[in-house]
Image (cartoon, grey):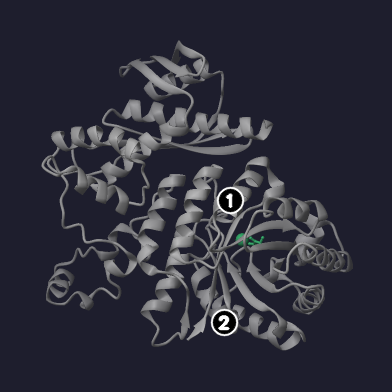
Amino acid sequence: MERIRIFDTTLRDGEQAPGAAMSPEQKLDIAEQLAKLGVDNIEAGFPVSSPVQMKAVKLIAENVRTTGVSALARALPADIDAAVEALKGAANPLIHTFIATSPIHMMYKLKKREDEVLSMAAKAVRYARRFTDQVEFSPEDATRSNPEFLFRVLEKVINAGARIINIPDTVGYTTPSEFYALIQAIKNNVPNIDKVILSVHCHNDMGLAIANTISGIQAGARQAEVTVNGIGERAGNASLEELAMVFSVRKDLLHFSTGINTKQIYNTSRLVANTINYPVPKNKPVVGENIFAHEAGIHQDGVIKNRETYEIMSPESIGRDHNDIVLGRHSGISGFKKRVRQLGFKLTSDEFKKIYPILLKTADSKTEVYDEDIIAIVNDELGKKTDTMRMKYFSILSGNSGISTATVEIEDANGTKQEAAIGDGPISAVFNAIDRVTGLHAVLEEFLIQAVSPSRLAVGEASVIINVDGKKFSGKGASTNILEASAKAYLNALNKSKISSESEAE
Ligand code: KIV
Ligand code: ZN
């Protein structure tokens, strides 16, 4: 078995998914879980890009000691200085520097000639090596670069001291056989390539990220850059859990191993999904809800006789319990506690004490409390934890003709304030009233409301994405009253925008 390094970029490339911004504390929680999962390196952020990014990388570097921690930097001295500053406290720091090498990126984005890019790349690597041995270089948009130029850049940066060469398929353009050929060509045409670890970093624009990653590894790469749940720019990155399970399920064919403890996959997936309010699609490979569900009678019959007729992996192998314990009004505190933990939440006992009565109330009004109810309730409470503005009261008057009116009362550190507003419907009226109280104004980009479980008494969960001055923030709210859930979601997103603008100002 050949060991493949897992370079996790959930907290950097993953966070670049629209609306997935995380606070430094949330990132630390995830980094600790990634260390438990067994990744080899955690790319914690892009320190030069904002003070919040800087703070997050520092926090992770100082607290996560058992796993390598890296920071991203363009091939510019100021970026590398910021990465060095952020990684100062790290036990095992790595600087990841990059510059685009494709004609389209060089001409339109960088406005630089080949010789300028070549020199910037080598200088950046040499500069970064003054601070740490561990320097990784990525030629951005490698798969659309001129191969001859790419080989020259790689030879130069290896001579300058790069230890890892990462080949990104930045726009998810390549195909498995083409990517295999590119990695092989790099091995055959870059004379000093055997001095470095080759890495691959594939995006999923055409759904080929995992296939391309595996091809790259078969061609000789020994590091894969991946994200939990495949989150990332546009269609996302190659997903960590898919890669780990391909190697685990098909070890007969693919003789590669990783340090991943697959039993931590489900927890990690849910922690990331819950933190960024990105639900895992039900049919998502490996971690989707339906992966062990069988609908067709023939399939059910087969599974009853032998699970392996229709299941190539077991729920236990990814740390997912069979939910044979149904939670309801007779379930005790320990049953709820266990399920909350399995769903990826790490609650303090005070937090659990706050949530338990809400869970019991839900259990009292229903025959069964579903995982989705629990996730919605816990997210609602955790969302409020960092929120400085909280809704105390709301009232809405709405009918089927014309204008709706809403009144809200919001509490913050300065006391409570009440405002009323009108709108075309109840949701716009309550959002307008919230804008008036908070003095903030956001463009609503996405709004979704759904019953989280199949029952008339279900908890309703609202999700919003708002845009404040060009930055996106997600928010969630849950309640058996869908108007209350919507108002809470909007206020939750406004709270995040307020926290972000305050941290930027620090
Ligand atoms: O996709 C990409 O090219 C990147 C680089 C910064 C490695 O994320
Ligand atoms: Zn990327």
Vertical order, 307 against 497 (above or below): below
What residue does disc 2 label?
A: 177
Q: Answer yes or no: do the residues labelled 2 and 1 have beta carbons within 8 Å?
A: no
In depth, the one of 198 and 30 nearer the eye is 30
Taking the image as drawn, is residue 208 in sight? Answer: no
Judge by depth and name the residue closer to the eye, 41 or 206.
Answer: 41
- Kindly state the secondary structure of the residue where label 2 is placed: helix
Residue at image coords 49%, 33%: 493
Q: Nearer the viewer, mark 2 or mark 1?
A: 1
Image quarter where ligand 1 lies: bottom right
* Amino acid bearing label 1: Gln
Q: How many marks?
A: 2
Which image quarter holds the C terminus? Answer: top right
Left or right? Give the position of 368 relative to 414.
left
User: Label 1's element?
Assistant: helix
Amino acid residing under circle 2 = Ser
Label 2 Cα neighbours within 10 Å, binned few <14 / some 14-19 / many ≥20? few
Which image quadrant for residue 459? Answer: top left
Q: Which residue is mark 1?
A: 16
Taking the spot 48% from the left edge, 55% from the top edge, the residue there is 32
Q: State which tag comes first along the sequence, 2 or 1.
A: 1
Q: Give percent across and percent down for residue 130.
A: 80, 64
User: Quick one: 300 or 493, which is closer to the camera?
Assistant: 493
Image location of residue 464, percent across then percent down: 45, 36
Mark 1 Cα shell of 10 Å, populated few (<14), some (14-19), many (≥20): some
The yes-or-no answer for disc 1 within 8 Å of ligand 2 is: yes
